[in-house]
Structure formats: structure tokens, C-alpha cells
Amino acid sequence: MADYQAPLRDMRFVLEELLDVPAQWAALPRLAGSLDADIARAVLEEAARLCAQRLAPLNRSGDEEGCQWRAEGVATPAGFAAAWRAWAEGGWVGLSGEAEHGGLGMPKALAAQVEELLNAANLSFALYPMLSAGAALTLAAHADATLRALYLPRLYRGEWAGAMCLTEPQAGTDLGLIRTRAEPDGDGSYRIFGGKIFITGGEHDLTPNIVHLLLARLPDAPPGSKGVSLFLVPKFLVEADGSLGARNAMSCGALEHKMGIKASSTCVMHYDGARGWLVGAPHQGLAAMFTMMNYERLGVGIQGLAAGERSWQNARAYARERLQGRAPGGAVAPGLSADPIVAQPDVRRMLLTMRALTEGGRAFSSYVASQLDLARDAPQPDLRAAAEARVALLTPVAKAFLTDLGLEVCVLGQQVFGGHGYIREWGQEQLVRDVRITQIYEGTNGIQALDLAGRKLVADGGALYRAFAAEMRADLDTAGEFAAPLAAALDNLDALSDWLIERGRRDPREVGAASVEYLQVFGYTVYAWLWARMARLALAREAQEVFYAEKLATARFYFARLLPRIHALSAALRSGSAVLYEVPESLL
Amino acid sequence: MADYQAPLRDMRFVLEELLDVPAQWAALPRLAGSLDADIARAVLEEAARLCAQRLAPLNRSGDEEGCQWRAEGVATPAGFAAAWRAWAEGGWVGLSGEAEHGGLGMPKALAAQVEELLNAANLSFALYPMLSAGAALTLAAHADATLRALYLPRLYRGEWAGAMCLTEPQAGTDLGLIRTRAEPDGDGSYRIFGGKIFITGGEHDLTPNIVHLLLARLPDAPPGSKGVSLFLVPKFLVEADGSLGARNAMSCGALEHKMGIKASSTCVMHYDGARGWLVGAPHQGLAAMFTMMNYERLGVGIQGLAAGERSWQNARAYARERLQGRAPGGAVAPGLSADPIVAQPDVRRMLLTMRALTEGGRAFSSYVASQLDLARDAPQPDLRAAAEARVALLTPVAKAFLTDLGLEVCVLGQQVFGGHGYIREWGQEQLVRDVRITQIYEGTNGIQALDLAGRKLVADGGALYRAFAAEMRADLDTAGEFAAPLAAALDNLDALSDWLIERGRRDPREVGAASVEYLQVFGYTVYAWLWARMARLALAREAQEVFYAEKLATARFYFARLLPRIHALSAALRSGSAVLYEVPESLL
């Protein structure tokens, strides 16, 4: 596999030129004076160095070795514990953590790009710090002051790690079916009884303690999703001074054997009266989880982006070196035994597809991240509300669209290698196996589409959508050669949205029948908007640097070859739910 | 994983009702009187029994165990050798073999359905008999009488196995780059020197001898693809009476570690002066390989179909049992904790997509197989020529389209399972890993698209295409509710074909720029034609059996939700090669 080259130039382009995020930072009291473009560049360069030098080299060995279940605990692959220490000592686990408890307080727009670097280097490894950061975020928002002071500094320092414990065998998408019980212990704590599955980082050897945030039912819980509470359950009980006490009554019963992310420890967990502490209000566990949901879902989307970037880099390097056949129209390397396959139009089509989808995804994910920052930190309530609205609308798109495209890009990157893409040696097949989980976990992509089409569009009556559509439409005037196709795409999305709101209100089955295609059309249209904006910048600077000429050419490719996908999706969508329901029962 | 249920009812529908292949058999002198619908049913039922009972149970264990390289030879997983004996003793390896040498002489239309059963049960296992049958086919067509008499009976009986040895590290797609040498030995045989990679079944413990058909260069060979000859190279030399003699100077240096098909032995082979015998004329090796190419490529397409069928069966069973959430519009199982997820519109969309693509693929592959039979066995030269023309045109579509859809269907079937689709336990992830190779080997799908768009369309001037299009168009009159969309799809394909012929003649880069999308549009249009024909039959028989009502509903789903994909593909295709070539060199 080619060495990982962090795409720092493109990250700068997105952060500084496309989104002008440093100006946003300067206007946020929490960040003004402490963060600017230069600091952000230095942060990304340092993260890139660590990712390329320490984490990327463990990607394939981690896949080969996997995690091992042992009675004394789960062993991560060789090198992972040292890599964790390096990552933690750099402060990266607490990159976005609250300064009050020792976090670095960096905004999501920057952290999202660090996450891309981390995931591109080693997706399996990335899950450990990402889950820790997610657990810390939830604690910061919902735990009481005592728990926060006890746990957050150690999570931010990477001294301990975190895990999120939601799924049970009978409760995956539908968390209202959770059966794990929490019984009051009399001293303010609870005893947890039950089992969880698919617990990422539930048990491992990276840290001496692991902090589980776990959903369970109190004895008086109402049935369904309104009776689920959130608990903090540490692997080792923690004394008031932060030292470790007795082992808690919890254990990892087994590791799941998975298609990919084999160096990530995916645990079956048993809780046999383990002591836990309530986080937030009773029965409000799912609401508390939603605090971190937008961050986590964007983070999973970025995993899809990152895997695609890695696959694209490898495929490009291979296509330039691999000699097979001759270019149509005449040899381009007549002195060699054959031409490099990059001379073949179909290989170029695959490479440009990978590049256009990846760079579009980088722009999109950074945009959503910048809105998360505004939603939290903007002092003006109207700015915050507008940003919250964008985040609500775009988060399901970011999670599902980035990961669906992540699989497509990784499959293309494998295809460029021919037979060599199917064997483990080159790493391309691992990327396909690893990225596949991103379409499934943190809410399947079908669930994301339902969230977008059902809650964010139909139930909302289209207000969130119209506000965002107006923002995209405002760029039509400066879209130049792309104004006409962008306008057509926006008109099409408007029409589909109106159509779906009208149909979905009459029959809820119409929402689910259209949701996946609707999300896809939405995604391609947002990418068209961002590509038009990027092209406008690139056109103005084309003479300065070849980077801009590349950007412009990639924009043209996107509009010519990828945006037309909305035609098929829109036509399919409009056929409605009848073909799904007016069928014999035996058909399904 | 759910038990494999052979789709015998649908196979009968395709063979007997849609294609009326038994009438074709009755008109072919080679088959008349020896094969009819009843015999075909009995053959399929017996194959189904063996596949379900003997081969399917080894699918997951074979994946877990894989093949093992040992100095004394490659070991296949537990149970494979016994399964091979069962398959061979049933005569299945020689199912299509020449009766003269002990084969059963069955037509491809029947053998293709047996191949589907075999591959659905165990794709890794299937490769061993399929490669043997392919090697036998090549020998039957090109070897001299002595070699045929010596080798064919033993290959047909499964006493020995076969392997095809083409690829070298520097020669994959471009076989003109082959370096393996063959030096005359003075006694009519040759000494082979060189190495091959990706050799399926090159070494294993299923049979005492393995017959390699190998491409190499003679000392006087012209450079490139016109200097490649075909040789028979047995693992053990064979005495005139068929008994085994000395070990030949060839060895398996290593096994490839692959994404999937792990129970298939994929070998790095060394030939250190191994004795070989020329098959066919000197320097005509690639032409000889083409004899079996159409059969092998259809066979690989059927692997994609088969994996999809298996994934669909599993996904349907799971979706009916898995309880999560409630159906939109109200509970359908109010007495249970939740509704089965098959009540969700998006799950129905996934299942119907899987079903429509799989049943369309069964019809298509059986149609192509029936044309292979006509091309070989029809006594009338004009019938043979017409069938040969159809085979030439449709083979690349069958290989690429069936396998591209195979991946899509397997990914959907994994998605239906949510997190359970990502762990090995349920088998869905193995199907994704296994099916992925089918898009790559036997000519990547990009190469298939070039074959279709370049050789079969543009270079041919459209004659092959127009003849087949007329055949599809003849069914418009009876297409009923689907006449309008089918006519539009045929008009669109006509226009794209004309456009590509005109552009491609001016600039060969236009062919490769459009080829993949062109093949896809072609495939969806052919499926539309077949679905319209199937719907016509189903409509007439709807009251007889629920099978027909299901068929009709699936046809409606295909036209509403899947055929519209041609809009996007056609628009992308028409953008031409400019966006691939008018770009900075550094972009790719």
C-alpha cells in the first residue's frame, strides 16, 4: 500500500478558502484569540505526522492480528497500546473537550479534519479515541459536577477510555426494547443486570479503566423508549481521589467476529450487578444520547470519507505505475512494455469519480462541522438557531451519504487494482471490509434516511429544508458555467420535497418508500452546490497554482458524470409506495 | 444462515415457460430424444439436493478454515474432498462433457442452472469443478485425439481436476505480456519455465492429478498476444494407459490471502522445466482460450446471480423474523413486542430490489445459455450464426452486469441484517466478500464493457446490436402495461448505440469513456425486455398460482424503481471523454 499522504492542502482550501472558518472562530467569544488559521494548520500538520508515522503502519498488521479474547481481558494488536499512548499524550483524545476539565476546547470544524486523518490512517484504531470522546461529550452535557470532575479529566487525557453501551440482541434500531435493568442500591448508585452486544471498545488493554455509558431501565420505568435511563458504569470502581478500587461486576463474554475493523474490540458484555451511576434525569437516557448523536453521526460519515481518501490515494499511485495494454489512440509510453493504466479512459473515470466524491465529501463534512460549532458557541440566539436547524437537517445526510459513497469509492479503488485489489497484500480489500460497517452502525443508513425524510422534512413541514435551500440558491448568481445544472438540481429537490411532504402527510408509508432515494438526491444536490462554490474560487485562482486547475476540472467531472444520478433516483422515488405494498404477502 | 432453498419453481418457469427450451432441445439432433422437460427437472432436483445437503453446509466452515499451504501440497478445508467425490460420482463435473469421452452431453441451458445451484451453495467449492469443466472444454476443442482420449474421460469423471494458468505478475488484463517460456524437448513435448499467479485450483488435495492448461511463449514466438501458445501441463506425468508417472517439475510456491473465496485454492505456481504438450497450433493460444471464454464468462456472471439469490433468501427470512419498531401507519403484530421489519417500506424496497434483480438475472443468464446451445448444436447455419451473434454481444453483458448486480444484491442483503450482517455468524458478510471477486476475474468488468462497446458495437458497426434490438422490439406489441416504458428504453438504447458508434469511430477514447455506463444501460434494458415477457406470461396465469402474482408484482417493481436507472447512466455517458482528458496531468 502507498504511504498515507495527509491531504493538508485540500483541508486548508476547505477550511480557509471555501468556508472561511477562521473568520467564524474570530467571531466566537469562546475561540476568539485562542485559535486562528496558523494554529489550525499546525494542529493538522502535527496530527498528520502522528497518523502517517504511528497509526497508518499498524493498519494492516492490526487487521491481520485482530483483537484476542482472553480470560484476563481483551488484547489489542501489537503496537496499539503504544499508539494509544502517543495519541493520548498529544492531547488528541481531549481535542474537543472542555477546557475546564483539561480538554483542548477545539472546535468541531478542526476536530472533524483531524478525525479524517485518524480514520484514513487506521479506522479500527480510530474507534477507541472516538468512542472515548463521545462518552466524554455525553458526560460533559448530562453528568453531575462530581462525576464530571472525576471522569472527564482522565478521559480527556486518555488515561481511561470510554464506551457507549446501547445495543442488545433484541434491541438494535429499536432501543425502546432494551431489557437491561438498573436497581437502586440505596447509596445513590445502582446495580446493573443484563447484557449488551456490539460494544465497541467495551473491553481492551489500552487503558487501566474503561468507562461505560449504558442504557438500562429503572424499576419504575414506563415501557418503550420513554423508560430508558443512562448510567455510568466503570470497569474498575473509582475512589473519590480518582484512584482505582475494586473490579466492577461486568465482563466481556466474547468478541464478535466481523467482516472488518478487526483491530477494534467489539464486545459482548455482561453486567452482573455492576455498580453504576445515573447520568441525567431518570427515563431521559435516549434524550441524553441525542446530545452526542449529531457529533457521532458526522464522525461516522467522516469514516466513510477517510476510507475513500485512502483508497483513492492507493488507486492513483497504482494506476500510474501499473503497465498493461496501450492507451486508445496510441501509446503514451512507447519505450515501456505497456502504458500505465491511468491512460485508459475507464480507469480515469474511476479515479475521477473517487476524487470528486471524496473532495465533495470533505467540503460537506467540514461545512456541517462548522455549523455544529455555531450551534454551540455563537452568542447570537438567531445564529445558533439557524445553525442548529442546518445541523438537524444535514446530520443524517452526512452520516448516510458519506458512508454510502465511502463504500462506492473503496470498491472503485479495489477495482482499479484488478486481481491485486482482491488479495490482502495491497490493502484495498481491507478498506472495503472496514468501511462497510459505517453504513450500518450509529443508525443504519436506512434509519438516517427516515430521520431526514420523516422527522426533518415531513413532520417539520419543510421549514428546515426551505431555509437551507434558500442558502444554496443564493449561490446561483455566482455559479457561472454550473448555474443552469445547479438551478435544475435545486428545482428538482424543491419539487421532490414538496411532493414528499404532501404525500407523506397522507400516508406515512410514503415516507419510508421514498426516504433512501430522497436522501441520495439531497446529497448529490448539496455536493453540486459545494462543487459550484469550489469551482468559483478555483476559476478565480486558476493561474496561481495547479491545485485550482485540478479543482475546476474535478468540478466539471462532477457535474458531467455524477450529478445526473439524481435523474434516476428522482424517477424511482416518485413511483411511491404502491409497488411496495400492492403485492402478494408471500412475495416478501 | 437460513438453509439454502433451491429456486426450482423459478428455474422451471424460466426454462419451460419463458424460454421454452425443451422445444429447442427437441429440434436439436444432438439432444432430441435424450432430453426433455421431465429429465431436466429431475437433473435440477438431484443437483439441488446435493448442493443443499452436501455443499451448502461446507460454505461457512470452508471460509473459516480456508486452504492451507503445506510443503507436501495444498490442503482444502475439511469435507471438501468428500464433497468433491460426491459431486464427481454424480457425473456433475462432466455434465456438459462430450458423450464420446464419457461426458453427459447436457446443454448449457441446463448446466447454467446447475451452476447457479452449485455457486449459491458454495462459491469457493464451485470453482474446482467449474475450472475442470473449462479445461476439459478447451481440450475437447483444441487438443489432439491422443490427449483428448487420455485426459477427457478422467476430467469428466472428476478423477483428475483442471486449472487454467494465464496470469503472471506483469500480465493480467494484458496477456500479450506473458513471459513464461516453452522449449521443445525433442520428443514432441516441451519444457515449461516461468511463474503464474492467481491460479485457481492450481494445487489441492481433491484429486491425485491436476491438469494445467497454461499459456507460454515458444522460442520463435512473435512478441505480444500473437506469440502465446497453449500447453497441457499435468502435475503428475501420465503414462499411455492413464496411470500416473513421475511428479512434474512444477510446484505451488504460496497461496494468495484473499478477501473471500477462501476455500478456493488460489496459487502462485512455479514451472521449473515441467513437461508440457502443445494444445492447438503454435502461437494460437489466446484464440484457443476464446473457445471457453464465452462459457466461463457466463459462468462467472452466474456466480454473481447465485450469491445474490443466497443473500436474498437469507435477508427475506431474517426480515420476516426480526422484530424492531412498528410499521408506519400502525402495528401489524400488536401482540408482539415489535413488528417484523418486513413491514418497513425501506426493507421491502431492499428485498424487492434483490428479488427483481435476481430473477431478472436468472432469466437473462438462461437466455444466453440457450443461445450458446443453438450456436453449437443447431443444424441450420443461419440459426447457428444468429445465435453466435447473440452470444458475442451478450456475453460481456452477462459477465459484468450479473456480477455488478451480484455485489449490489449481496450488500443489500447484508444491510437488511443491520449489525448482524457485519458479523460472520449470519453468513451475509461472506457473500459480499465472495461475490466481489466475480467483478474482477475472468476479465474485469471494465474490460467486459470495452469488449461490448468497442469490439461488439463500434468495431462491428452496430450489426450485432441491431439484430438483437429487433428481437427485443418484436415483443413490444405484447408488452401490455410495460409497452411504453420498454419502448422508451429501447429507443434510448438505439440512440446511445448510434451515438457511440459515430463518436467512437472518430476517437477511440470515446469508447472507453462511455463503455461502463453503456453496458449498464444495455443490461437494464435487456432486463426490462425479459421482465415484460415474464409479466405477460404471469398476467395470463395469475389466477392459477400465487407464483404468477408475485412475478407480476416484481415486474411492476422493476419498471417503477429500477429501470429508471438508465436515465442517469445515459446522461453521464453522453458527456463524453472531454471531462476525462481535458484535465491537468497532475489530477490523475
Image (spheres, coloured by chain):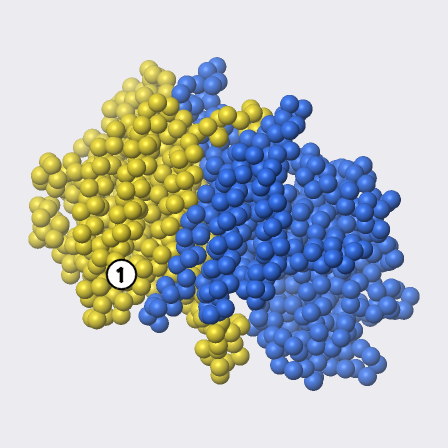
Chain colours: A blue, B yellow
Q: From the top left corner, tell me how far across and down residue B183 is, in percent.
A: 35, 20
Q: Which residue is rendered at x = 16% and y = 54% of the image?
A: B20
Position of A231 with respect to A395 (left or right) is: right
Q: Note whether residue B576 is visible.
A: yes
Q: Which quadrant does the N terminus of chain B fall into? A: bottom left
Q: Which residue is rendered at x = 84% and y = 52% of the image?
A: A30
Count neighbours of disc 1 (C-alpha within 10 A) and say few if under 14, some if 14 to 19, many if 20 or more: some
Q: Note whether residue B422 is visible.
A: no
Q: Is residue A22 above or below residue B19?
A: above
A340 or A98, nearer to the observer: A98
**Disc 1 designates what residue?**
B10
Q: Secondary structure at mark 1?
A: helix
Q: From the top left corner, tell me how far across and down residue B169 is, in percent.
A: 47, 30
A266 or A576, nearer to the observer: A576
Q: Which residue is rendered at x = 16% and y = 45% of the image?
A: B99
Residue sitting farthest toward the front: A477
Position of A435 with respect to B401 (left or right) is: right
Residue B194: quadrant of the picture: top left
Q: Give amino acid for label 1.
A: Asp
Q: Which quadrant does the C terminus of chain B fall into? A: top right
Residue B561: quadrant of the picture: bottom left
User: Which chain is indicated by disc 1?
Assistant: B
Q: Is residue B212 above or below residue B555?
A: above
Q: Is residue A241 above or below residue A54?
A: below
